[in-house]
Image (spheres, helix red, strand yellow):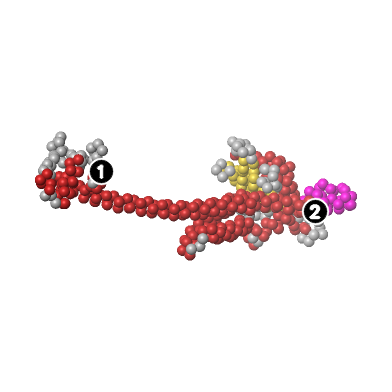
Amino acid sequence: MDANRVQEQSKELVNKLLSGDPADVSDAVNQYFKASFSDAALRTSHVDIHGADRIKQLGRLSGLIRSKKGKIVEAPKFDEKSKTVRYSATLPYTSPRLPSYIPLSAQLSGFQTAVEWQFVAHLTADDGEGKKLYVAKLEAKRCNPSLIDNAIPAWILRPLVTYLTLFIVSFMAFYQSHKGESAGSFAMAAVVEVINTMWSFIAPEVGRRQEQADKWREEKVPQIKQYIQNASSQALDTASKVQADLESRAKSAGIPVDDYKQRTTQAIADLANNVEARAKAAGVPVDEYKKQAEAAIEELKKRAGEMGEFIEGKAGEAKEGARDVAKDAQKKVDGAKQGKQDKRTRENSNQLSQDQPAPSPTHAPTVSVTGEQAGHLSENDQRAKEIQAEFEQTPRTPLGGHDPTAPNAPSFAAAAAL
């Protein structure tokens, strides 16, 4: 159907389906139904038939019991949102004339009735652009269910009636194509037809179930992969926690690092085997999982090695830092001792400068001692004279203190030692 003329063309489709003429029904199926047995379907309260060819065969069977054209009760209406065409019609039926040797053949032959049906045609696009629509499934439901419909559940009644209908349709098609042949040829053709009928009944069901399996696989495989990825992530997190706990216990118990790494690797390997078993049960490719598991194990091994190197490096840095701290402390002690010694030197120098007259800016002070006085000096007086002479020779500041910045001037410590 043209997407822009669905309402108009749906009326033509309905008129052909209700005509009761097998040629019109076959033409409508060829023109408006999808050709694939898995796409075209007819589902009623009694039958569930898949395949365009089977629908046309059912049209031939319906032509035998249809006395005249069906009457439209509700005109076809196209719903663009749901892509469906809905209509209702009354179909007249007349039972075929039965042989006289069948009981009650006179009462059953030529029996007429009319049944009102509600139809829903589900359309689908087949060209990928939505410009062309085809009937993928035609559903029919009786407006007034019969006693049989109410007494027997549809899941029991529909398969039985479907199988019986397909058998009758196949027999009719076989008889029409082989009538007039010899008995031997007819028997051989009957055997082949039975085999083909059985296969034609099984093949659509196999195809339908295969499509359902493919659809389920398309939906479930990503979910299974996501589940495996989540399980792997959780396994890695658990392994990391177990690794940290085992490392703490190993350090407390004094276990060597190499032994700890070996135990951790074994635990991770056991965990990977468990995840691999789940992956096999879920149908995930084992080779792909193994690659992921091996990559995760290698990453954990790398982290464990880096952790050991980090710990050893930190221990070395701590020892080196302790030595640096000890050296700094010793330097501070030596500096404190030198400071105290310099302080005592400055105090002695200041004391000597207070006892002697202040020197002039250009000439150092002198002390004159006569020969007569020298004879009467004691040993202590002689030492004081020597200290005074050494003090006069030391560079001084204008205020009389020691000047360490003067040329060739000794330091405070050297000056104190003089």
Classed neighbour count for the residue bearing mark 1: other residues with Cα under 10 Å, few (<14), some (14–19), many (≥20): some
> Which residue is outermost to the bottom?
253
The numbered mark at residue 100 is none
Residue at x-position 67% and y-position 46%: 40
x, y percentage for residue 326? 36, 53
* Residues drawn in magenta: 170-194
Give the residue type at disc 2. Answer: Val
Who's the residue at 78% across and 48% down the image? 173
Instruction: Indicate the position of residue 81 as horizontal and vertical percent values.
Output: 55, 43
Dividing the picture into quarters, in which one does residue 46 lie?
bottom right
Q: Callout 1: helix, strand or loop?
A: loop
In the image, 55: left or right of 384?
A: right
Say which element carries label 2: helix
**What residue did someone put label 2 on?**
194
Q: Earlier in the sequence, mark 2 or mark 1?
A: 2
Which disc is residue 411 wearing?
1
**Residue sticking out furthest to the top:** 362
Figure check: 5 above or below 280? above
Q: Is residue 292 left or right of residue 356?
A: right
Asked whether residue 118 appears in the rendered view, the answer is: no
**Does residue 262 appear in this view?**
yes
Q: State the residue at coordinates (70%, 47%).
A: 37
Q: Is residue 46 magenta?
A: no
